[in-house]
Amino acid sequence: MKKKIMPFQRFYDSRYGWINITRDMAEKMAENFKNKIPHYVPHINLRHNKERYGDITGLEVKSDGLYADIEYTPEGLKLVREEKYRYFSPEYLDDYVDKRTGKSCGPAIVGLALTNQPAQPDTDETFRFEEHEIKTLTIKLEEEEDEMPDGNDKVIKLYEEELANVKNEKKKLEEKLGESEKKANELEKKLGESEKSVKELTEKISQYDTANKKIKIDSWKKKMLGEKNLPKSLVEIWEKKLEEAEDVDKEIKFAEETLKNIPGLKTGRKIGLDEEDTGGKPDGEKLLEERVNAALGFVGMKRGEK
C-alpha cells in the first residue's frame, strides 16, 4: 500500500529548529532508494526502535510529497488494523555516506517508524485505507491463509482476525458511501424544492407588480378624467404609454407635467365640442383629434424622440 510519509512543507522541531522538506530532497531520496542506498531495506519499526514490522519496498514523489510503498509483517499489520499506532515518522539522513564507496550520496530514507506523536505534521494515517487497498489486503490475506501449513493454529487465527478486520473496514466504507449517496439525493431534492419555491415567489412578485401597476394607472386615469377634466381620448392614449412603461411612477409624473404644460390645453378645463372650441367647424371631434396629436407631438419633442 502507498502512504504519504513526507509532505512538502516547512515545519518547526524543538530539537532541530526549522526543517524544510522540498521536492528536490524527495526526488533525491527516491533516486537513492532505487540505487539501493542504503545497502539494506529500510524497515518499519515501532517508535524508532529496531524491531521490524514491515518494509519500505518503493518510494515515489507526487505533487504533495514523498510516498512509500509499504509491506507489513503479520504483526505489523495487526498493530495497524487495531489502530494502536496512528501516524508515520520517517527516518532519514541529510547526507548519507555509501558504506561501499565512502562517497556522499545526499538525503536518503533509512527507516519508517509507527508512532502516535510524529514530528512532522500532515503525514498519512497508518490505518486509513483506500477501497482498492482493502481489496488487495483481502486477496492477499485469503491467499496466505490457503497456503498455511496444517497445525499452525496460532498463525491461522492471526490471519483470520486480520481478514475479519479488513472485511469489517470494507463494510464500514460501503456504509459511509451509502450514507453519502443518501445525503446527496436529499440535497438534490431540497435544491429542486428551493428552485420551485423561487419560481413560485418570482411569479407572485410579478403578479403583484402587475396588479399594483394597474391600480396606479386606474387611479391616475380617474384623476385625469375627474379632477382634471381632460379628454378621454387623450387620457386613453397616455394610459397605453403607462401600461408599456417599466417605471410607472416616473411615467405618471412625466405625464402630469407634460399635460399641464401643453399649449392650448389647460388642466381643469374641459374641451367641449361647441363652436368656440371648434373655431366654427361642425366637427368638434376633429379638433379634439388634432389637439391630442399635437399633445403627443409636444411630448415627443420634450423627450427628444423622433
Image (cartoon, rainbow, N blue to C red):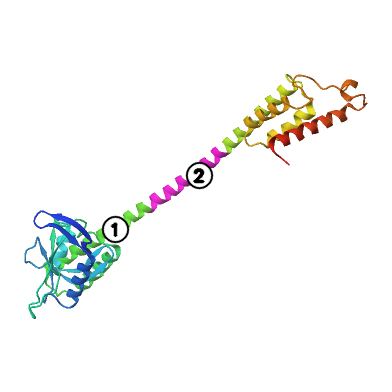
Of pointers 2 and 1, the one earlier in the residue sequence: 1
Residue holding disc 1: 171
Residue holding disc 2: 195
As for residue 187 lying within the magenta part, the answer is yes
Name the side, left or right, on which 199 lies relative to 182.
right
State how far apart marks 2 and 1 are (Cα). Answer: 36 Å
Which disc number belongs to residue 299? none
Displayed quadrant of residue 202: top right
Q: Residue furthest bottom?
A: 101
Secondary element type, mark 2? helix
Work out whether residue 58 can be spotted. Answer: no
Displayed quadrant of residue 210: top right
- Identify residue type, mark 2: Glu
Residue 236 percent across, percent down from the top left:
76, 30
For image coordinates 92% across by 24% down, the residue present is 280
Secondary element type, mark 1? helix
Q: How many residues crowd mark 2 within 10 Å: few (<14), some (14–19), many (20+)?
A: few
